[in-house]
């Protein structure tokens, strides 16, 4: 019986990672501003989720559990003693020209601008506008008030705008949206 | 006002969606690739736990922790490597006082040396007790299986810690390092809130570094030998680390007395390029066998919410 239970857990966990792993990897990339760090973050978070899987009700919201683990783990990693930057790989510049290439270039610029925001502003923008979580839930995850979420979102977006400058000449698809949860 | 917020939200969603959708996908790192990586981590953790348990049991049975670790770690190694790994192994199971000064030298761009960070601490790695005080006002305490970190009021506000200056983490769970290799841990871990741990350097030296005898060394109340180690472009650092070099002074009793580590990072954002930032870590160790106690900070000053919602 125990063996069968473990196999079932493995199967469900495997199916979850296959279907949702990439989404969380993308979210983590925006959250960390670094694809390598995102890989580490998601792997470590999935490991924690796997260890907890038998104890939690994953039939309803495994995405929510994993998202919360990612945010908490990222928060604990970020408690660095110094706020000084350590070297990270430079993201290659995207080619411009056709619409698709232009859209990729904009995406790249937005990611670079996001990476320059404070950790809290970046987390709020990603959770609020990429994961589409309500303000109250973002506040709960980040341990701050809903008012602080509003403030971080407003200031983060203002900084993003300032960093991006004039993007009107790029063909950004208004209808695009992150993969839904 | 509502319209402004709606417009703002729409713009934010559009920008974030573009950033999300245009991320380059890599089948090797998503889906099954991600699953394989998680399984490897799971297996590695299980193996590590088994090895640690076996070593600890053998050490207790023999009553000689350092000797057992030494016999496991340096079979077939050069005398210089054996001496250094033995001293680091002894530190892993000992109590001592430590001072560390970290200096950051930015070579590219510009040429500037940042104000150093100093750390003074008492560590008993066998009993998992640590108290470290940093020159920037931070403190770290490890006691009762928990790590407590005190940050400045500004940091506490920034991190959403509800104004509480101390945070609490369960050892071995939330503090699990995200490093891919011992070299990466040595290169980046000093800039974390984790206390000094000689295990990563020990693993790095055993696996790939050259260690040579540099002659005699001495300090207040001790004489011994200086050893030098060097490692270029260490694996598992994403080519961001140019080199890790250093010296280790070991006294005639086999205790590590001082250590200087120099970590040269490639120029910012240019993997494989020549060093752009150099960190120097200058350690001194003393008072081996010292007995001290560490108490947790008052509960009312601790932000206990790490892992809130789901406890791992």
Image (cartoon, coloured by chain):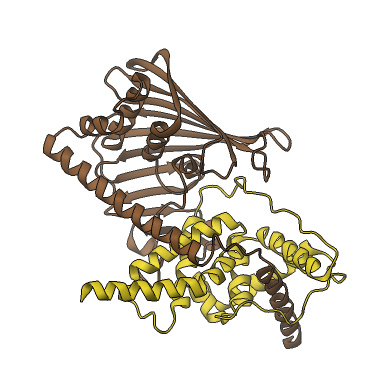
Chain colours: A yellow, B brown
Q: Position of residue B118 (x, y in %)?
A: 49, 36
Residue that sits furthest to the top in the current view: B216
Residue at 48% from the left image edge and 42% from the top image edge: B190
Residue B165: in sight, yes or no?
A: no
| In the displayed structure image, the side of residue A36 where residue B177 appears, left or right | left
Q: Is residue B113 above or below residue B293?
A: above
Q: Viewer-proximal residue, A93 or B300?
A: A93
| In the displayed structure image, the side of residue A59 where residue B271 appears, left or right | right
| In the displayed structure image, the side of residue B250 where residue B119 appears, left or right | right
Q: Which picture quadrant has residue B215?
A: top left
Residue A103: in sight, yes or no?
A: yes
Residue that sits furthest to the bottom in the current view: B2
Quarter of the image with the C terminus of chain B is bottom left
Q: Viewer-proximal residue, A172 or B311?
A: A172
Q: Position of residue B191 (x, y in %)?
A: 51, 45
Q: Viewer-proximal residue, A111 or B123?
A: A111
Q: Is residue B220 above or below residue A115?
A: above
Residue at 72% from the left image edge and 82% from the top image edge: B5
Q: Is residue B132 above or below residue A38?
A: above
Q: Position of residue B140 (x, y in %)?
A: 40, 48
Residue at 42% from the left image edge and 43% from the top image edge: B133
Quarter of the image with the N terminus of chain B is bottom right
Residue that sits furthest to the left in the current view: B61
Q: Position of residue B297 (x, y in %)?
A: 34, 55
């Amino acid at each position: 019986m125990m063996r069968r239970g473990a196999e079932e857990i493995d199967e469900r966990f495997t199916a979850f990672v296959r279907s949702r792993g990439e989404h969380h990897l993308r979210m983590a990339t925006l959250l960390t501003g670094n694809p390598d760090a995102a890989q580490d973050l998601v792997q470590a978070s999935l490991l924690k989720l796997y260890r907890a899987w038998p104890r939690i009700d994953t039939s309803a919201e495994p995405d929510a559990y994993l998202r919360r683990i990612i945010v908490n783990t990222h928060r604990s990693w970020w408690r660095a003693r110094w706020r000084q930057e350590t070297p990270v790989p430079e993201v290659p510049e995207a080619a411009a020209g056709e619409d698709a290439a232009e859209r990729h270039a904009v995406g790249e610029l937005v990611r670079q601008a996001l990476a320059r925001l404070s950790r809290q502003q970046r987390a709020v923008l990603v959770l609020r506008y990429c994961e589409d979580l309500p303000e109250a839930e973002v506040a709960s995850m980040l341990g701050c008030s809903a008012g602080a979420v509003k403030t971080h979102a407003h200031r983060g977006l203002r900084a993003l705008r300032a960093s991006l400058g004039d993007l009107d000449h790029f063909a950004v698809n208004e209808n695009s949206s992150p993969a839904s949860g | 006002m509502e319209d402004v917020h709606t417009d703002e939200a729409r713009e934010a969603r559009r920008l974030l969606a573009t950033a999300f959708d245009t991320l380059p996908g890599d089948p090797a790192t998503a889906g099954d690739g991600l699953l394989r990586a998680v399984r490897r981590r799971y297996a590695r953790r299980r193996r590590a736990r088994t090895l640690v348990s076996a070593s600890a049991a053998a050490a207790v049975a023999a009553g000689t922790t350092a000797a057992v670790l030494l016999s496991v770690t340096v079979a077939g190694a050069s005398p210089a490597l054996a001496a250094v790994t033995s001293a680091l192994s002894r530190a892993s199971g000992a109590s001592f006082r430590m001072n560390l000064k970290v200096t950051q030298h930015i070579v590219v761009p510009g040429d500037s040396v940042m104000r150093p960070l100093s750390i003074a601490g008492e560590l008993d790695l066998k009993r998992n007790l640590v108290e470290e005080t940093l020159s920037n006002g931070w403190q770290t305490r490890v006691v009762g299986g928990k790590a407590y970190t005190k940050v400045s009021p500004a940091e506490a506000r920034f991190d959403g810690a509800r104004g509480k200056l101390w945070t609490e983490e369960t050892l071995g769970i939330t503090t699990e390092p995200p490093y891919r290799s011992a070299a990466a841990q040595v290169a980046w871990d000093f800039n974390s809130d984790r206390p000094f741990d000689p295990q990563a350097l020990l693993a790095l030296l055993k696996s790939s570094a050259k260690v040579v005898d540099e002659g005699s060394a001495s300090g207040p109340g001790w004489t011994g030998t200086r050893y030098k180690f060097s490692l270029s472009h260490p694996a598992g650092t994403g080519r961001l680390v140019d080199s890790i070099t250093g010296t280790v002074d070991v006294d005639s009793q086999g205790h590590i007395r001082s250590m200087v580590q120099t970590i040269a990072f490639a120029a910012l954002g240019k993997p494989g390029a020549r060093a752009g930032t150099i960190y120097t870590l200058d350690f001194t160790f003393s008072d081996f066998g010292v007995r001290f106690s560490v108490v947790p900070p008052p509960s009312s000053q601790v932000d206990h919410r790490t892992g809130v919602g789901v406890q791992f």
